[in-house]
Image (spheres, rainbow, N blue to C red):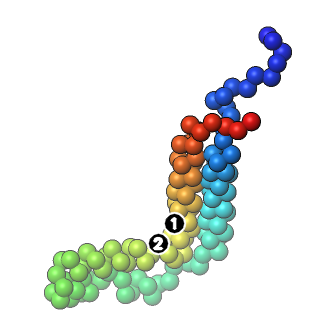
Amino acid sequence: MNGGKEVNPATQRSPRQKRFYRAGMAALVAGMIAAVIIYATAPPPDSAVSLYSMADPRYQMELQRIGGNAAVLMAQFHQWFDGLWHGTALAYTVAVLGIAVAGACFFIGYFFADEAPQP
């Protein structure tokens, strides 16, 4: 009980660490807000897209005959990846990317904890 202001050095953060934590929070908040807006304004799925999809067995058989199994797998991968950037799937993609960027900022900021804080 000495009455002086003693600050625990573990609770002090360096300016660089604070910047990374703030950037992480900004990325997280911006990503979540963007994801909610995209989800709310996404149009319903189009029925015409399902007519020309990889689900058609005739298309898969023809593609396999022309290009083999690798062509079928690559077409399925391309269709999946293309689907991430439309409709409600885009909202989930933006949310995950926002979380990943925020996590990277927090992770990098954590390693600046070894830096001596400036008074």
Residue 47 in sight from this viewpoint: yes
Q: Taking 51 as reference, is 26 above or below it?
A: above
Residue drawn at x 30%, y 83% as measured from the top left = 56
**Which residue does the numbered mark 2 point to in the structure image?**
84
| Kind of residue at disc 2 | Leu
Residue drawn at x 67%, y 37% as measured from the top left = 117
Q: Taking 22 as reference, is 34 above or below it?
A: below
Residue drawn at x 24%, y 79% as measured from the top left = 72
Residue 61 in sight from this viewpoint: no
* Residue 102 spot, x, y in % from top left: 58, 54
84 left or right of 15?
Answer: left
| Kind of residue at disc 1 | Thr
Q: Residue 101 sits in which quadrant?
A: bottom right
* Residue 24 spot, x, y in % from top left: 62, 53
Residue drawn at x 18%, y 77% as measured from the top left = 69
Q: Using a 10 Å C-alpha cutoff, classify the residue at mark 1 as few (fewer than 14 neighbours), some (14 to 19) or many (20 or more).
A: some
Q: Residue 30 sits in which quadrant?
A: bottom right
* Residue 84 spot, x, y in % from top left: 46, 72
Q: Taking 118 as reference, is 72 above or below it?
A: below
Image quarter in which the C terminus is found: top right
Q: Nearer the viewer, residue 18 or 44?
A: 18
* Residue 59 spot, x, y in % from top left: 26, 87
Residue furthest top as drawn: 1
41 left or right of 90?
Answer: right
Element on which disc 1 rests: helix
Q: Using a 10 Å C-alpha cutoff, classify the residue at mark 2 as few (fewer than 14 neighbours), some (14 to 19) or many (20 or more).
A: some
Q: Earlier in the sequence, mark 2 or mark 1?
A: 2
User: Pointer 2 and pointer 1: residues touching (CB < 8 Å)?
Assistant: yes
Q: Nearer the viewer, residue 79 or 103?
A: 103
Image quarter in which the N terminus is found: top right
| Res. 93 mark | 1
Q: Taking 61 as reference, is 31 above or below it?
A: above
